[in-house]
Amino acid sequence: MNILVLGSGGREHALAWAIKQNPKCDRLIVAPGNAGIAGVAECAELEITDGGAVVDFAEQNAIDFVIIGPEAPLAAGVADRLAEAGILVFGPSAAAARLEASKAFTKEICDAAGAPTAAYARFTEAEPARDYIRQKGAPIVVKADGLAAGKGVIVAMDEETALAAIDDMFGGEFGAAGAEVVIEEFMTGEEASFFLLCDGETVLPIGTAQDHKRAFDGDEGPNTGGMGAYSPAPVLMDAVAEQALTEIIRPTMIEMARRGTPYRGVLYAGLMIENGRARLVEYNVRFGDPECQVLMMRLGAQALDLLLACAEGRLAEARVDWAEDHALTVVMAAQGYPGSYEKGSIITGLDTLPEDSFHMTFHAGTRLDNGRIVANGGRVLNITARGATLAEAQDRAYGMIKQIDWPEGFCRSDIGWRAL
Ligand code: AMP
Ligand code: GLY
């Protein structure tokens, strides 16, 4: 079959790499893609949040199946446009994507579903929000309701920071995303991510992961999109996963279906685990990046069969074959990230790296320039490895990094420390 993947990051490189290994895949196009993706698929220019343009492109290229990577096209209704055109698509409708696109909506669903999550209040005006913060005190969490490229959450350890966040959000710093604000109880515990495929009826767990959000070793420094990840997450042991399924995920899916907006796609549940119980931090309606890289490393070619079963509503008959293994990915970023950084520095040594089912270098932000690989973003490479143990996967990944020559880049040297 002919497959189109939308997106251009390490997540989409990992998806393309896994899909390409499945004999069902005849032709693979990734739009817009990047220099690494160009090694496994055709790359094409396409405005991926424009549903009409995506439908036209899919029809012109006889695409049988579209897989949507990032949240923006989902929130923009690209899956709806494809479905209306009769094209098979992996990814939720815009109505179901509100589970990521609106934090207030997610809280409303949790209330209706009785799912454990942080206590909260929602505001559309600054003064009552400030009063609420003064009344509750710090630590407290202030969130812009809408999509804010991962920057709309302020975990305030003191009242002043929380009040400043209110000024920023209602002052327009996050545009329309900040027109409504959710203020939440600060939850303590250990965070982990649970990934599930949902076809509107059946829920199929496909793996757990943990990421490292802070830029520097020891979980210090500013928040980023994620500096590394590993799978499985030891804190999400079977009993916790089962509780999260019964108390959080299944009731959410039932409530979404009851409202006439069934959820179909991958659900990424961010959980806070304390004393053996999970509470919901947030939902995302897509694979995590870089969590997808470690999941794909462990799933391999069967990923395509699972995504197809999900899109075709056949999850009840699908099975996941897990190897009892571990995967770990280290993000190499441009110096300065997540602040300002330069693009265009040259990366060498990549051609000496092994590429097999135990070692893969996924590209997050690269571009080809006269045959050379150059950095083209903040997060640039995801050095990913698999092993019988997490320690082995970690050794392999850092062994690969030693062979990369990129003075303008940096990475954390302790990815996986919490689980080791
Ligand atoms: P979100 O975008 O909702 O995942 O928030 C980003 C990060 O902020 C999460 O991964 C948590 O580390 C943190 N966070 C969000 N909500 C809370 C909360 N209620 N209590 C503690 N930490 C939180
Ligand atoms: N790594 C976090 C995310 O994809 O949202």
Image (spheres, rainbow, N blue to C red):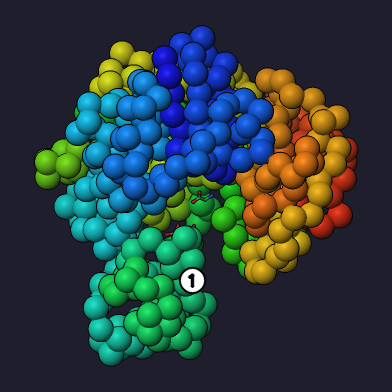
Q: Can residue 394 be seen in this view?
A: no
Label 1 neighbour load within 10 Å: few <14, some 14-19, many 20+ = some
Quadrant (top left/top right/bottom left/bottom right) for the C terminus = top right
Q: Which residue is drawn at 37% across and 48% down?
A: 49
In the displayed structure image, the side of residue 34 where residue 61 appears, left or right: left
Between 52 and 353, the residue placed more toward the observer is 52
Residue 34 position, x and y percent, is 61, 40
Q: Quadrant of residue 276?
A: top left
Between 58 and 408, the residue placed more toward the observer is 58
Residue 271 position, x and y percent, is 43, 49
Q: Which residue position is annotated with label 1?
A: 155
Residue 410 position, x and y percent, is 78, 55
Amino acid type shown at disc 1: Val
Quadrant (top left/top right/bottom left/bottom right) for the N terminus = top left
Q: Which residue is drawn at 50% across and 23% down?
A: 28
- Residue at the farthest top position: 23
Residue 106 position, x and y percent, is 27, 55
Q: Within 8 Å of ligand 1, the CB of disc 1?
A: yes
Q: Quadrant of residue 56?
A: top left
Q: What element carries label 1?
A: strand
Q: Which residue is drawn at 81% across and 35% down?
A: 350
Q: Residue at x 31, y 13 (%)?
A: 317
In the displayed structure image, the side of residue 356 where residue 197 appears, left or right: left
Say how many tags the image has.
1
Q: Can residue 206 be seen in this view?
A: yes
In the displayed structure image, the side of residue 7 where residue 181 appears, left or right: left
Q: Quadrant of residue 164?
A: bottom left
Q: In this view, does 24 lie above or below 72?
A: above
